[in-house]
Amino acid sequence: MAVAKEQIRQIISQNNISSVTDVYSLLKESFKDILQELMEAELDATLGYEKNQKGDLLTDNKRNGHSPKTLKSQYGEFQIDVPRDRNGEYEPKLISKYQRDVSGIEEKIISLYARGMSTRDIHDQINDLYGIEVSAEMVSKITDKILPQVKEWQSRPLNPIYPFVFMDCIHYKVREDGRILNRAAYVVLGVTVEGYKDILSITAGANETSKFWLGMLNDLKNRGVKDVLFFCVDGLPGFKEAIQAVYPQAEIQRCVIHMLRNSFKYINYNDLKKFSTDFKAVYNAPTESAALTELDIIKEKWGKKYPYAISNWENNWEDVSSFFQFSDEIRRIMYTTNIIEGVNRQYRKVTKTKSVFPSDTSLEKMLYLASENVVKKWTQRYRNWDQVLNQLIVLYSERITKYL
């Protein structure tokens, strides 16, 4: 350490360093010199001897000048001289033959893009930090490099069974043939038998229809999903029919929170708090029969004033009531789609600067990058998952154990 400090002091005195700018300039020049020397050392290793040190070594290969090459780095652009050998045996490893960027800029651009920064903001950020101009077209080309990863991710094999699968969609505008069209991004999220969350699929489509959902569910089946115990969904059109066609054994649980919101639309603001408090007795009831009794009490109290708020539950009771047969640990997982709404909030956050996407591919690319950032944070499994799994095995032993 004492020697290092002395060397630093010597460098400072020799280069007349008096500001941060001077330090940056020195680092830039040093970076270039170090790369140059490393490449010269690579050629030494290929030839078997250092420059002017051939001695008695028997070889007809030798140095053959240099080729100039302009590189982009975190210190800006500079020229390096790539050494050559006469026999063409030297293959640079430090900086490959066609590599012209050693800055890691591409990874940084993809990271900024994944966090929702606009191409203008990315341009300004990269220019301020590294002095490199990055156009909108270049950002698009760089991010397009992940498209093979997106396709691979969309078709990757999945687990044979998921105890819980959540399905929802989020809407965007996409330009197509000079027109701006509405697109739905269909999101499927699963909970594994180990209790961990994972995003199984994201697909951009024209509209919410049972035909489209059927295609998505068949895609899950083709990718290896043999069985699903519970589908937790909002009341979007086409869900139920598609699920029953592909996974007839699965139970469907309508999101209770969405049901409440739909009921609240019919309630006067002055009565909203009282109605909401009363309704807790329904979805917190210990059994389905107790819940129906509580619903009758609420109907008697509020039914004449707000008939549609009550009929909304009566008409959809079959799809709402599934969770009453289970313990609190399982109920907490399946009675609401808040988990997928949390993912949708992250999508909205990173897409808020994009009022219109140029294509479906561009939309899927952005959502894939956002998904990667979301999934990285899912390091913990569901609380009390061991209890949840043991109860599910008791209830659905053959459907689960054959895949464990």
Image (cartoon, helix red, strand yellow):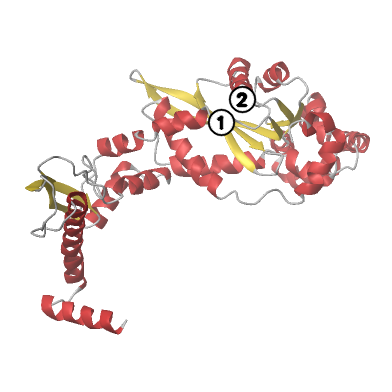
Residue 175 is drawn in which quadrant? Answer: top left
Q: Is residue 96 left or right of residue 381?
A: left
Tell whether label 1 touches label 2 (CB within 8 Å). yes
Q: Is residue 159 left or right of residue 173?
A: right
Residue type at mark 2 is Leu
Q: Is residue 296 left or right of residue 318?
A: right
Q: Is residue 182 left or right of residue 225?
A: left
Residue closest to the eye, 52 or 6: 52
Q: Is residue 158 above or below residue 13?
A: above
Give residue 87's position: percent from left, percent from top: 12, 40
Give residue 314's position: percent from left, percent from top: 82, 27
Residue closest to the eye, 319 or 85: 85
Residue at image point 29% right, 48% down: 105
Disc 1 secondary structure class: strand
Task: Give the quarter of the figure containing the N terminus.
Answer: bottom left
Answer yes or no: is residue 193 visible. yes
Q: Residues within 10 Å of mark 1 (few under 14, many from 20)?
A: many
Task: Give the quarter of the figure containing the C terminus.
Answer: top right
Q: Is residue 391 above or below residue 320?
A: below
Residue placed under numbered mark 1 in the picture: 201
Residue placed under numbered mark 2 in the picture: 220
Residue type at mark 1 is Ser
Disc 2 secondary structure class: helix
Q: Residues within 10 Å of mark 2 (few under 14, many from 20)?
A: many
Picture disc at residue 62:
none
